[in-house]
Amino acid sequence: MAYAGPLAMCSALLLGIFTGYPVAFVLAGVGVLAAFAADVPLLFLSTGVSRTFSGILSNWLLIAVPLFVFMGLMLEKSGIAQRLLRSLAGIMGSKPGGYAFAVTIIGIVMAASTGIIGASVVLMGVLALPAMRRSGYDLRLSTGIIAATGTLGILIPPSIMLVVLGDTMRISVGDLFAGALVPGLLLGGLYLLYLVGIAIFRPQMMPGLPAGEHLPIAQLAWQLARDLVAPLVLILLVLGSIIAGIATPTEAAALGAAGAFALAMMSRQLTWAIFSDTLRETTRTTAMIMFVMIGATVFSVIFRKLGGDVMIEDLLGVSSGTASPYQVLAAIMLFVFVLGMFLDWVEITFIVIPIVAPIIAGLDFGMPKEHVLIWFAILFAVNLQTSFLTPPFGYALFYIRGITPPEISTRTIYLGIVPFVILQAAGLLLTIWFPQLVLWLPGVLLGT
């Protein structure tokens, strides 16, 4: 069989992942075992070692990963979201949807400041879910909007995933940050439109605030100014310095980390225990990403050596020319969507991107190659966002399940995310049909 080696590697990888063994070790182990089974020269394995040192461990760009993680966790500890929730909900007063709209807006703001899905979902769940339940919100709507808005952090810059994608695909991170901004805000806008429809046609699903919780307009305005200005200024400094080319992503991430630390200090909520926990979580997240990168490098080197890239091209109809570029793109997007039901974005990125990115770059979409890669990277990112919400292994669902009381069933949570998965799919289709949603802003700001 022509592709026995690559097929065996894929099968072994899936089996290894479902055993619950750490994915990084499964990737590297499958690669090494396949190399021995196929009698690949030992000298060739040194290719994986050299790529690990030159492409990962000595990569200056990847220093931005722990810095952005630290920035997000520090902002989470500063208490900004807790104060914003009450202020934004108070604006709606007795009108339906105060907490729902507040959660969505805070989700967008926190997405542009944290980028840590677990932190965003858990934070909003702990803060907003009890208030929503007290106000009589529909439980499916409550859990669905918290899970969906919490996942925006993986797309809206500064996003760790975009930094990793930029490094893996050799694309400017500034271009990706600029390209992801409109699609990310588009998804947030779709969520808001959905809530507007619920407020108009089914207001009983999200009642307004009780009369006793209304705040004076002047007090609301002061609280919003106090709690929104500081994080927005920090976000604009970080994104603006990257997109304008004033600072590299690593330098901007350092600025963001320092600014987030200062905000946490000024909020008077930063203790030594919180600081230690933040450093520990930053180290754990960074180590996980780096180990998966190393394991994926070993796997992809051997996979290509055994003809895996040719096998993928044949499956997609690229080699024979039977499939159009958009058919190939649709097949890849569907494949990534299905993978997202079982794997995390880190594993999917490092397994799939090295194989499919060269295929996409060689197809004719009627635009320059560099535009195609930026557009595809953002499509890939939007698609991966759904991986946090799709059963059976959607991570956002697990985070929500972990903080909800027993009376909220898993079935309720799963039903609650269905409308938002549909909205994310609609956002992905719009981004495919209208590439300028991705390419317009990089063209205006960077001339890309």
Image (tube, helix red, strand yellow):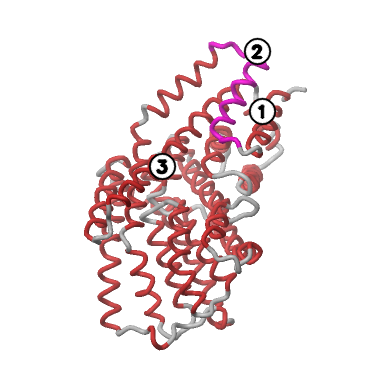
Of discs 3 and 1, which sits in the foreground?
1
Where 313 sits versus 280, above or below? above
Q: Quadrant of the N terminus?
A: top right
Kindly identify which numbered label has been placed on residue 380.
none
Identity, as a three-letter code, of the amino acid under mark 1 = Met
Does 448 lie within the magenta span?
no
Task: Point out the stretch of residues depicted in magenta.
Answer: 21-43
- SS assignment at label 1: helix
Image-quadrant location for residue 105: bottom left
Q: Quadrant of the C terminus?
A: top left
Of label 2 and label 1, which has the lower sequence position? 1
Judged from the image, the secondary structure of the residue bearing numbered disc 2 is: loop
Mark in front: 2 vs 3:
2
Return the residue nearer the eye: 431 or 190. 190
What distance separates the C-alpha of mark 3 from that of mark 1? 28 Å
Marks 2/1 in contact by CB < 8 Å: the verdict is no
The amino acid beneath tag 3 is Val
> What residue lies at 64% left-to-right and 16% top-to-bottom?
36
Residue at x 27%, y 43% (from the top left corner)? 254
Q: Which residue is mark 1?
A: 9
**Is any part of residue 300 visible from this angle?**
no
> Which comes sooner in the sequence, label 2 or label 3?
2
Q: Residues within 10 Å of mark 3 (few under 14, many from 20)?
A: many
- Three-letter amino acid code at the position of disc 2: Asp
Q: From mark 2 to mark 1, how far is it between C-alphas?
A: 14 Å
Q: Which residue is mark 3?
A: 163
What residue lies at 59% left-to-right and 31% top-to-bottom?
26
Dominant secondary structure, magenta: helix
Which residue bears the numbered disc 2?
Answer: 39
Does 234 appear above or below 47?
below
Q: Is residue 15 visible?
A: yes
